[in-house]
Image (cartoon, rainbow, N blue to C red):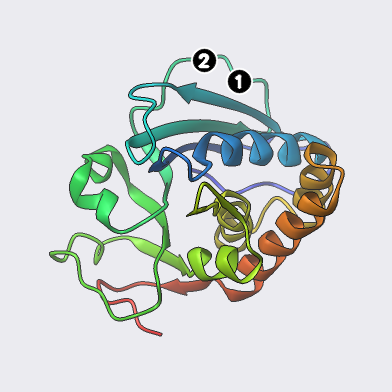
Amino acid sequence: MYSRNKNSGVVSTMYYEVIWVGRGGQGAVTASRILAKALNKENIWAQAIVFFGAERRGAPVYAYNRISDQAIKYHHFVTKADVIVIFEPSLIGLTNVLDRAREKVTIILNSAGKSIEIDGKLKEYQLAVVDATSIALQLNLRVAGIPVINTAMVGAFAKALGFPSIKSIKEVINEVWPSKIGELNAEAAEKAYQETKIIKSSMVRE
């Protein structure tokens, strides 16, 4: 993972690999696609890669992004990630996703906001936390009763990484859903962007 070089005309070394892990019905696949489109709007190369395993609701679902300021040569699944977006804390124990973390990984976690500690597994990472579930419930973003938190988690990504802009994310969301549902999802992304907290600890507090 490298930072961007903003100087015009200078070749930089921006390169991130991202893993999204959620449960079926939470929208992890759509989140990875929205992120890629928002990055493309800002002239950043990005690809979204989808893995369809068990397709039942509630089963773990993975999606991936690669992000660079140059053309991306690789198109296989991400094995080691600079950023891992986790849609609920239970997925940390249920999956081996932290085994796929690079040394300076950023973890973006949806948490209900209460103090949690997960066997000290998060203490060595930079951690960004947002209560995306509450945001989805406030805006009535549900499918078959399940809070759909994907757009909120894209907003959290933008806050944690510093790109893409929340403006680009909201534009993409409204292009994907050009209706009231798009407006609500854009609002979810904005709220998550504003409410995401950056933490470096194994403890997540309100």
Q: Position of residue 151 (x, y in %)?
A: 63, 52
Examine the rendered structure and indicate whether residue 75 appears above or below residue 35.
above
Task: Name the residue beneath numbered marker 1.
Answer: 72
**Residue at (52%, 23%) from the top-left corner?**
49
Q: Secondary structure at mark 2?
A: loop
Examine the rendered structure and indicate whether residue 142 appears above or below residue 100.
below
Q: Position of residue 144 (x, y in %)?
A: 51, 46
**Residue at (54%, 32%) from the top-left corner?**
65
Examine the rendered structure and indicate whether residue 4 appears above or below residue 64.
below
Marks 1/2 in contact by CB < 8 Å: the verdict is: yes
Question: At label 1, which amino acid type do we have?
Answer: Ile
Task: Name the residue beneath numbered marker 2.
Answer: 75
* Foreground residue among 6 and 204: 204
Examine the rendered structure and indicate whether residue 117 appears above or below residue 77.
below
Q: The C terminus is located in which quarter?
A: bottom left
Q: Quadrant of residue 81?
A: top left
* Foreground residue among 174 and 204: 174
Q: Position of residue 13 (x, y in %)?
A: 59, 36
Q: Secondary structure at mark 1?
A: loop
User: Is residue 97 left or right of 20 when viewed as pictured?
Assistant: left
User: Is residue 199 left or right of 143 when viewed as pictured?
Assistant: left
**Badge 1: residue crowd in 10 Å (few <14, some 14–19, many ≥20):** few
* Foreground residue among 25 and 4: 25
User: Which one is in front in this view, the residue at disc 1 or the one at disc 2?
Assistant: 2
Number of numbered labels in the structure image? 2
**Residue at (66%, 66%) from the top-left corner?**
139
Q: Position of residue 166 (x, y in %)?
A: 75, 58
Q: As drawn, which residue projects farthest toward the front?
A: 144
Return the mark for residue 15.
Answer: none
User: Is residue 122 left or right of 141 when viewed as pictured?
Assistant: left
Q: Quadrant of residue 109?
A: bottom left
